[in-house]
């Protein structure tokens, strides 16, 4: 065979491969694309004992494979029949010599006969008959039209694996999203095995790529729909980064985020309240010592229940251990922060002792935080020892990208080696300080889109005139001869309830609750897009200038978030001008966060309500029993009896009742048939009926049982207390009509006391123009006056447990009669209430 030296190896492999296929003789020619022939030569060979069919290749590029090589894999390697820059034409006889019976000008071959095996003749007598082709014949063969093979030859070529089609790549991304991706599990060897193989794993910049593991090729779109996004970050003070943290958490749908170096303390309630909004809750574990800095915390969705199990500050690190629960799942998360100046040996000893206790917990375990070890440096003795410690406890570290702006792996996410808790790649995103956010997906139920079923009435759509018309035509207003207060009270509730159901029936629907930032406007959104564009540019180019520009844009975006948030809340405060109550509620919301009524853990709300009721009743009984054992003298009063006594309360007019209702707040109780604001809107038609009920109650000194029924709500005495029954106090809410009767009686009682039996001068409670502020001012004034007179002052503060519930009502009734002259039906009415 004659060919250039660079092609000798290729022809040799081709010859051996064709011998295996059973070819007897071939002609090889090499053409350039301009038509010139490099070399042409006959090639003769034989392979005894082979029974292979022979076939004819002609113009292989006519099969549509001109731009890609025709190749085949076999056990000896890779064989190429057609190169893009060369055209190898292989011709072989398919008939007994002298060659094919067709004319080259037609370009058609006769059907091949049955294959003739060389084994029919002894190998020693085998003779090679060769058909020689001239230069003109070969050129004519090249210029002829496409030569089509018979189906049997094509099937044989396909069976031999010679045909390789490019295929279609259209819709590849859609197919990848619809079908599960097969993951190749990495097989990691120990460091000692690499030493025994004498493999150099250190690059020129001192980075050890052996800590890198193959990433599972999973799509984030499929992950986010079924799993939870988990993140960690070293914040280096959360106080001045609240807006950025909330924006990043809501925008990236983060479910759980661990923070180290929060720099928070027990006085940072406003910062914690700012983070505990927009669908999230934040819990902090500040540094226990007097040293500044440090501290850990956890930000999580408000649909989760997070409990602090343990937290401590060791000599070399600090941690907080949390357990998060959903409806049927729980996970244990440990936030760890190791200061950079702490001793590595002490840390390894203390952290090893801690792992002995935590690693056997039954829940899925995640240990995350800032360990301040350069895990990417192979020569770092601390990183090697820490990695060996994790391997001892069958733990794995998953972060493989630099988490610090200086380019080292400091923030780690650690799980059990046998756990599949971590899904997909771990990414670094926003640089909130000198550390990035480190994020990944975990196998934990995601509750980013939570639903709740609510029942409501379209009260604002009520036609007030039609509502009044139905009240006027009802039995409540048409019948004016009501003498029984119980019947009138029931008729009032049933009539208004029926009319309300007619105009605003109860509807139930399922709402989707999503986190929303109220001060996130269009300007912020536009600048966020600019920041994202700069981030993509920096990731694509990797240039230091692009990263620097991205950091500047991040700083400008954070400043924009601060100014936008401040402007939003300034407008809210400006809207409270002239309304001190509304302003107080807004300030309380900004400083204390959302009003979340924490209750003890329970499964059945009815059972919990019964337990609360039993506890409150039993508590009062125990206090009364302890007081009854104390021997005291009967109360003595030196107050003279009033000259004028109050025997009965005067009936009220319709105008009096309208004044009481108009000056009342719009607060309602769930036991009211209609809201208070709707009562005020229909006051001209409801006032006669309400006045009739109030006068019947005063005249007969009777209060119906439904007016005495209240909704009791347990409230935590102080935020942060343990959720036990003793730390709750009961708050009752009565119906609106019962409050109207109380105000009608109190107005007459205070008027009698004002002219006939003045109240004590130092009483500040339950008096007009008096409050706790006036009491404190009086005490402060007395203390300052005593100091001016060089007198010693002793202040005694008395706190009574359940004072109003344990007071003896009979003593109060006696005082009303003896000191204030309340007798007769008026005294009976006070007893009934």
Image (cartoon, grey):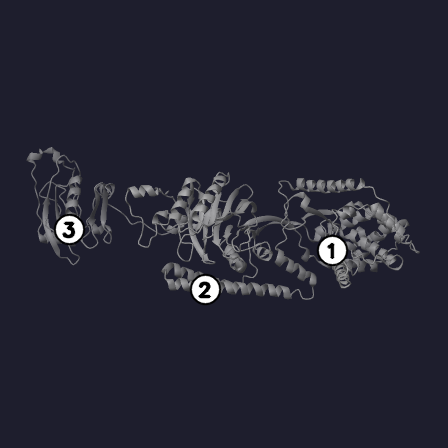
* Residue receiving disc 3: 7
Mark 3: give few (<14), some (14-19) or many (20+) Cα within 10 Å. few
Instruction: Give the residue drawn at x 72%, y 58%.
Output: 464
User: Looking at the image, is 342 positioned above or below residue 520?
Assistant: above
Query: What element does badge 1 sit on?
Result: helix
Q: Are marks 3 and 1 in contact (CB under 8 Å)?
A: no
- Which disc number belongs to residue 557? none
At 83% from the left and 55% from the top, the residue drawn is: 746
Quick check: marks 2 and 1 in contact, CB under 8 Å? no
Front-lying residue, 266 or 298: 266
Q: Earlier in the sequence, mark 3 or mark 1?
A: 3
Would you call the spot at circle 1 few (<14 residues within 10 Å), some (14-19), or many (20 or more)? many
- Sequence order check, earlier mark of 2 and 1: 2
Image x and y of residue 327, in percent: 56, 42
| Label placed on residue 553 | 2
- In primary-sequence order, the first of circles 2 and 3 is 3
Q: Nearer the viewer, residue 519 or 307?
A: 307
Residue 813 visible from this viewpoint: yes
Secondary structure of the residue carrying numbered label 3: helix
Q: Disc 3 and disc 1: Cα gap in Å? A: 99 Å
Instruction: Please name the residue that numbered disc 1 is placed on.
Output: 676
């Amino acid at each position: 065979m004659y060919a250039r030296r660079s092609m000798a190896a290729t022809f040799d492999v081709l010859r051996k491969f064709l011998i295996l296929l059973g070819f007897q003789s071939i002609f090889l020619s090499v053409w350039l694309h301009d038509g010139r022939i490099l070399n042409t030569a006959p090639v003769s060979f034989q392979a005894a004992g082979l029974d292979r069919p022979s076939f004819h290749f002609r113009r292989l590029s006519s099969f549509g494979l001109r731009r890609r090589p025709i190749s085949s894999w076999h056990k000896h390697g890779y064989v190429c029949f057609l190169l893009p820059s060369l055209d190898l034409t292989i011709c072989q006889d398919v008939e007994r010599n002298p060659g094919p019976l067709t004319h080259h000008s037609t370009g058609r071959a006769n059907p091949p006969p049955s294959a003739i095996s060389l084994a029919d003749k002894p190998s020693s007598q085998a003779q090679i008959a060769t058909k020689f082709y001239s230069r003109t014949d070969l050129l004519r063969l090249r210029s002829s039209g496409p030569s089509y093979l018979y189906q049997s030859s094509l099937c044989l070529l396909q069976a031999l694996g010679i045909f390789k089609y490019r295929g279609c790549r259209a819709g590849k991304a859609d197919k990848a999203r619809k079908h599960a991706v097969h993951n190749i599990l990495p097989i990691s060897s120990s460091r000692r095995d690499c030493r025994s193989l004498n493999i150099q794993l250190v690059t020129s910049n001192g980075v050890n790529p052996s800590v890198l593991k193959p990433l599972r090729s999973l799509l984030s779109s499929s992950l986010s729909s079924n799993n939870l996004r988990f993140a960690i970050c070293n914040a280096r003070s959360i106080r001045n980064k609240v807006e950025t943290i909330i924006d990043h958490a809501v925008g990236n749908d983060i479910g759980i985020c661990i923070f180290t170096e929060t720099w928070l303390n027990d006085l940072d309630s406003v910062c914690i309240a700012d983070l505990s909004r927009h669908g999230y809750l934040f819990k902090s574990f500040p540094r226990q010592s007097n040293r500044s800095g440090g501290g850990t915390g956890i930000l999580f969705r408000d649909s989760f229940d997070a409990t602090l199990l343990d937290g401590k500050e060791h000599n070399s690190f600090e941690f907080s251990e949390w357990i998060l629960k959903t409806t049927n799942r729980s996970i244990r998360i440990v936030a760890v922060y190791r200061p950079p100046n702490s001793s590595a040996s002490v840390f390894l000893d203390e952290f090893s002792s801690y792992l002995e206790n935590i690693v056997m917990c039954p829940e899925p375990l995640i240990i995350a935080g800032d360990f301040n070890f350069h895990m990417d440096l192979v020569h770092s003795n601390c990183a090697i020892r820490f990695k060996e410690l994790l391997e001892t406890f069958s733990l794995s570290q998953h972060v493989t990208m630099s988490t610090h702006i200086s380019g080292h792996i400091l923030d780690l996410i650690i799980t059990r080696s046998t756990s599949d808790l971590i899904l997909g790649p771990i990414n670094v995103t926003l640089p909130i300080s000198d550390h990035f956010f480190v994020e990944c997906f975990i196998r934990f139920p995601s509750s980013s889109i939570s639903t709740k079923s609510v029942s409501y009435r379209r009260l604002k759509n009520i036609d007030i005139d039609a509502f009044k018309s139905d009240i006027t035509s009802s039995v409540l207003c048409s019948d004016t001869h009501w003498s029984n207060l119980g019947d009138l009270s029931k008729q009032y509730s049933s009539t208004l309830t029926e009319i309300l159901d007619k105009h605003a029936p109860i509807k139930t629907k399922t709402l989707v609750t999503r986190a929303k930032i109220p001060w996130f406007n269009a300007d912020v959104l536009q600048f966020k897009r600019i920041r994202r564009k700069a981030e993509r540019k920096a990731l694509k180019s990797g240039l230091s200038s692009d990263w620097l520009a991205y950091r500047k844009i991040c700083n400008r975006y954070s400043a924009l978030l601060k100014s936008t948030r401040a402007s939003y809340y300034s407008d809210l405060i400006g809207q409270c001008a002239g309304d001190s109550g509304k302003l107080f509620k807004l300030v309380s919301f900004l400083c204390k966060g959302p009003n979340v009524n924490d209750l003890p853990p329970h499964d059945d709300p009815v059972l919990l309500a019964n337990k609360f009721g039993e506890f409150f009743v039993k508590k009062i009984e125990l206090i009364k029993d302890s007081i009854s054992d104390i021997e005291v003298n009967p109360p003595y009063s030196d107050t003279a009896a009033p000259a004028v006594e109050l025997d009965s309360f005067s009936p009220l007019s319709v105008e009096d009742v309208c004044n009481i209702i108009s000056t009342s707040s719009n607060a309602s109780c769930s036991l009211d048939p209609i809201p208070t604001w709707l009562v005020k809107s229909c006051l001209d038609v409801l006032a006669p009926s309400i006045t009739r009920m109030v006068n019947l109650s005063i005249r007969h000194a009777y209060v119906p049982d439904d007016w005495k029924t209240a909704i009791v709500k347990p409230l935590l005495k102080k935020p942060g207390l343990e959720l036990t029954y003793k730390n709750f106090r009961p708050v009752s809410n009565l119906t609106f009509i019962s409050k109207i009767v109380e105000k009608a009686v109190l107005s007459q009682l205070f008027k009698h006391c004002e002219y006939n039996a003045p109240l004590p001068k130092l009483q500040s409670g339950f008096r007009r123009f008096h409050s706790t502020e006036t009491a404190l001012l009086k005490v402060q004034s007395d203390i300052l006056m005593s100091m001016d007179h060089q007198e010693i002052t002793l202040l005694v503060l008395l706190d009574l447990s359940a004072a109003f519930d344990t007071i003896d009502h009979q003593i109060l009734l006696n005082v009303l009669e003896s000191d204030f002259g309340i007798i007769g039906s008026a005294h009976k009415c006070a007893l009934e209430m």
